Image (cartoon, helix red, strand yellow):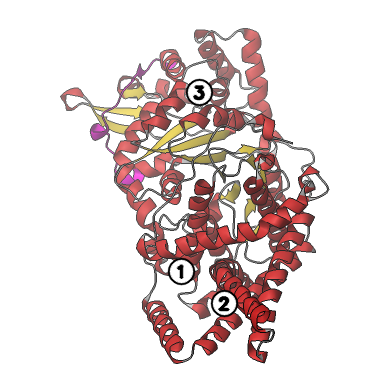
């Protein structure tokens, strides 16, 4: 038996009569009920969803009223072990598959009952079916959705854990970061290290020359990429137009949280400002099961019915992508967006993303919203961070998206088509930069990404140590991602093309290698300059190397600063730009420190996730 019926018909007298009776039981006035009916008709949703989304009625009271009205039993608790359903089917139910089909339940005295928490699109149809099959009335038990989901989660937990931990590794092991390197990569890395030591012992000058050539190649590659981004399109122009809300799909919002008690109220407020029909919006706040410091404050805020806490079991790898992969089967949306705890997305962002997907083709898999740094006035570190984000999200990513090239995503505000996300295996729980990794995998599977115009506001780290841990994690993830994606170079080029492969090497490898070698070039440049001052002359070879050092540094700094200036636009952020210029050498040395720390961790703790703590936003920092 299945109670799935179809969309509400506002002219169905029996339907409206039954719902009117339920509404009266719940204390809705006639005017309120008529308003809900109009909303349901306009959106093509059910009165059940609109009543629950209104916030006027508790879920338990609602389902009790429905049960009383159609004359079946009502239950408030279920023992998971008594439900006759296996883990895989339970996991599908959590994602909205087959939710209207009753589940056999072994009651007291081994009596079989059937429990259901249906969508209730057609209450009249359910009532008629019960009238035509009297045996159902005695054996059917209606339970609230939260009660059913809690029982299903308990049953599905083993399948959920395996799906999150092993899915990508089992389906496409060559794209999983569970292992650091494969055989030939380990051999090459070992050979390079031994070769470097041997080369230094045989001829240090030639070794220095070789290091300069390698560094120059990557420095120039990054310079060319930044200069190309200066002339790229500055971002998408929103063309939302007239929005037909009756066609809006279910939109799933996932937010991974850890130790975020301070920011929970602000997060719920930001999510509450999103423009989307509440009956077609679901928010999953994903927390580690032992993180009561976050879970309890969320519960204390009494979140609305469209917000659910997903608890990740203890014992799993503690990374953000693992939490995301665990939570994905809980969602039922055709579109999925990720936000971070500190994010304040533009209210119209979901609508813009949906309309862009509607107007795009099936290969458009993800849309990245630009991230704006709100606290850029708080100090030089925050201002440098803001310029970096402006360059990345307002120039570089739009250029890549507009050119159809591989686009490494930012860690938040990624809007996915669910079908494409599932196709590529979702997030890699072992990759600490899951955002860049999944952008590459989408390209390798033939999908493309692009950018939105409406931004998400967030704050930059406010101390050096927080910044260092965050940037080290990013650098480590880029290095790890490069190793993962280049395990089979020929396959990589065939699947992604030469252009996207070059972008991958420049972005993942070029930035990391440039940061690693920058202090060496700076040291050599100072050494050669000191020799020139003390001796009054340099050999042709050393003069050439000094020229390379000066050229690399000037071009590197110059391209970085020009791109930042252009990306910042004509707004107030350009004020005091001279201080940014003067701080750039310091910032680049900070990047080098983060890169060397990342390289050490890559071989000692490749899967360690160094979380960035967040604080409530200070409105005074906003320009």
Residue 485 horizontal side relative to residue 392, left or right: left
Residue 74 magenta-highlighted: yes
Residue 371 horizontal side relative to residue 288, left or right: right
Where is residue 366 shown, x and y percent of the image?
61, 54
Which segment is the magenta one? 70-89
Does residue 369 appear in the picture of this structure? no
Residue at the (46%, 58%) spot, across then down: 425
Q: Of tags 1 and 2, which is closer to the observer? A: 1
Looking at the image, tell me whether mark 1 or mark 2 is earlier in sequence order: 1
Where is residue 123 shown, x and y percent of the image?
50, 23
Q: Nearer the viewer, residue 37 or 386?
A: 386
Question: Looking at the rendering, which quadrant does residue 252 occupy?
Answer: top right
Labels 2 and 3 touching (C-beta < 8 A): no
Find the residue positioned furthest to the left: 109
For the residue carrying disc 2, how many other residues have a C-alpha within 10 Å: few (<14), some (14-19), or many (20+)? some
- Residue to which mark 3 is pinned: 123
Q: Nearer the viewer, residue 391 or 128?
A: 391
Residue 64 horizontal side relative to residue 348, left or right: left
- Give the CA distance from mark 2 to mark 3: 55 Å
Q: Is residue 377 above or below residue 433?
A: above
Where is residue 30 shown, x and y percent of the image?
63, 8
- Residue to which mark 1 is pinned: 484
Q: Is residue 420 above or below residue 111?
A: below
Residue at the (55%, 39%) spot, across then down: 253
Question: Looking at the rendering, which quadrant does residue 279 occupy?
Answer: top right
Where is residue 464 shown, x and y percent of the image?
54, 48
For the residue carrying disc 3, how many other residues have a C-alpha within 10 Å: few (<14), some (14-19), or many (20+)? many
Find the residue positioned furthest to the front: 534
Task: Report helix, strand or loop for mark 2.
Answer: helix
- Give the CA distance from mark 3 to mark 1: 52 Å
- Residue to which mark 2 is pinned: 493
For the residue carrying disc 1, how many other residues have a C-alpha within 10 Å: few (<14), some (14-19), or many (20+)? many
């Amino acid at each position: 038996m299945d109670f799935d019926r179809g969309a509400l018909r506002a002219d169905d007298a029996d339907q409206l009569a039954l719902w009117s009776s339920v509404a009266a039981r719940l204390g809705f006035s006639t005017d309120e009920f008529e308003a809900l009916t109009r909303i349901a008709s306009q959106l093509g949703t059910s009165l059940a969803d609109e009543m629950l989304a209104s916030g006027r009625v508790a879920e338990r009271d609602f389902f009790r009223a429905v049960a009383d009205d159609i004359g079946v039993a009502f239950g408030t608790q279920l023992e998971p072990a008594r439900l006759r359903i296996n883990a895989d089917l339970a996991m599908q139910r959590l994602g909205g598959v087959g939710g209207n089909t009753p589940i056999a339940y072994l009651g007291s005295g081994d009596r079989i009952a059937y429990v259901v928490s249906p969508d209730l699109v057609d209450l009249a149809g359910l009532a008629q079916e019960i009238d035509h099959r009297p045996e159902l009335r005695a054996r059917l038990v209606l339970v609230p959705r939260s009660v059913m989901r809690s029982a299903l989660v308990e049953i599905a937990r083993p399948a959920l854990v395996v799906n999150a931990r092993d899915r990508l590794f089992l389906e496409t092991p060559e794209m999983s970061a569970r292992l650091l390197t494969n055989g030939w990569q380990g051999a090459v890395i070992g050979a390079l290290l031994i070769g470097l030591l041997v080369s230094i012992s045989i001829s240090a000058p030639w070794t220095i020359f070789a290091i300069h050539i390698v560094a120059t190649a990557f420095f120039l590659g990054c310079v060319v990429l930044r200069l190309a981004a200066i002339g790229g399109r500055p971002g998408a122009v929103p063309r939302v137009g007239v929005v037909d809300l009756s066609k809006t799909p279910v939109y799933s919002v996932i937010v991974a949280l850890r130790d975020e008690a301070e920011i929970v109220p602000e997060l719920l407020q930001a999510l509450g400002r999103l423009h989307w029909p509440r009956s077609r919006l679901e928010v999953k706040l994903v927390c580690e099961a032992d993180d009561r410091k976050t879970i309890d404050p969320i519960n204390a805020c009494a979140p609305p019915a469209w917000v659910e806490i997903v608890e990740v079991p203890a014992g799993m790898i503690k990374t953000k992508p693992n939490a995301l992969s665990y939570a994905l089967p809980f969602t039922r949306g055709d579109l999925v967006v990720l936000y971070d705890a500190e994010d304040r997305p533009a209210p119209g962002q979901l609508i813009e993303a949906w309309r862009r997907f509607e107007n795009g083709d099936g290969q458009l898999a993800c849309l990245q919203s630009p991230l704006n740094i709100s606290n850029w006035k708080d100090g030089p570190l925050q201002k440098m961070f803001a310029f970096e984000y402006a360059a990345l999200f307002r120039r570089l990513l739009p250029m890549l998206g507009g050119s159809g090239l591989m686009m490494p995503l930012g860690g938040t505000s990624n809007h996915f088509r669910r079908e494409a996300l599932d196709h590529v295996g979702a997030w890699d729980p072992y990759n600490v930069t899951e955002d860049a990794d999944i952008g590459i995998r989408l390209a390798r599977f033939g999908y493309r990404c692009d950018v939105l115009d409406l931004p998400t506001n967030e704050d930059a780290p406010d101390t050096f140590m927080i910044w260092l841990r965050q940037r080290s994690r990013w650098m480590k993830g880029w290095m790890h991602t490069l190793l993962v994606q280049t395990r089979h170079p020929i396959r990589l080029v065939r699947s992604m093309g030469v252009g996207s492969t070059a972008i991958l090497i420049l972005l993942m490898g070029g930035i990391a290698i440039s940061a690693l070698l920058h202090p060496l070039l700076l040291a050599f440049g100072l050494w050669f300059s000191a020799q020139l001052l003390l001796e009054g002359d340099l050999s042709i070879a050393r003069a050439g190397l000094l020229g390379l050092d000066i050229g690399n540094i000037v071009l590197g700094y110059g391209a970085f600063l020009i791109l930042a200036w252009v990306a910042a636009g004509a707004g107030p952020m350009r004020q005091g730009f001279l201080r940014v210029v003067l701080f750039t050498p310091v910032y680049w040395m900070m990047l080098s420190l983060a890169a060397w720390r990342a390289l050490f961790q890559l071989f000692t703790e490749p899967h360690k996730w160094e979380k960035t703590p967040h604080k409530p936003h200070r409105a005074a920092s906003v320009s």
